[in-house]
Amino acid sequence: MNLNSYKNLNYNAKIKIVFNNSAFGPGVAKIMSLVKETNKLSEAYKVMGLSPSKGWKIIKRAEEELGFPLFITVVGGKGGGKSELTEEGEELLSKYQSFVNELNIEAEKLFHKYFSS
């Protein structure tokens, strides 16, 4: 590969936090972010192109592996149900997003260091 072909390169990094042979990563974080915006798990699943059963399995597995609930869900009622992040869910999402944002800043610097002409 000659140096001129580096002009078309880019990078993509997916960050997962690994614990006890399990991981918390961009998929669950995206669902959590969407629920924070919309207050609806069903809307988060829809935006991500997940069936409700697939989305529910992802969330339940993450909660079991983490050992705490990520959401508080109120079913039905006036105006329909709603979901919100638990205190632990809020803290995890905030730390994960901050960590990923800082890593992306450093990754961008390193990418340009090694692949810019």
Image (cartoon, rainbow, N blue to C red):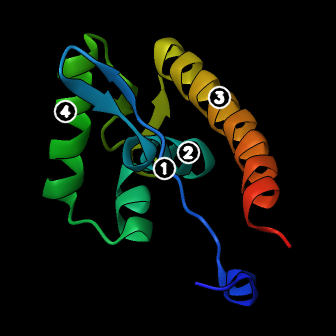
Residue with the mark numbered 4: 60
Q: Which mark is residue 71?
A: none
> What is the C-alpha distance between the residues marked 2 and 3?
15 Å
The spot of residue 60 in percent (x, y) is 19, 32
> What is the C-alpha distance between the residues marked 1 and 3?
15 Å
Q: Nearer the viewer, mark 1 or mark 3?
A: 3
Say left or right for 106 vs 76: right
Residue with the mark numbered 1: 30
> What is the C-alpha distance between the residues marked 2 and 4?
16 Å
Residue with the mark numbered 3: 99
Disc on the earlier residue, 4 or 1: 1
What crowding class fits label 4: few (fewer than 14 Cα within 10 Å), some (14-19), or many (20 or more)? Answer: few
Q: Amino acid at mark 2?
A: Ser
Task: Look at the numbered disc 3 and give the secondary structure of its residue.
Answer: helix
Task: Look at the numbered disc 1 and give the secondary structure of its residue.
Answer: helix
Total numbered circles: 4
Disc on the earlier residue, 2 or 3: 2
Q: Quadrant of residue 83?
A: top left
Task: Look at the numbered disc 2 and give the secondary structure of its residue.
Answer: helix
Residue with the mark numbered 2: 33
Disc on the earlier residue, 3 or 4: 4
What crowding class fits label 2: few (fewer than 14 Cα within 10 Å), some (14-19), or many (20 or more)? Answer: some
Disc on the earlier residue, 2 or 4: 2
Query: Residue at left 55%, top 29%?
Result: 93
Disc on the earlier residue, 1 or 3: 1
The spot of residue 116 in percent (x, y) is 82, 69
Query: Residue at left 56%, top 45%?
Result: 33
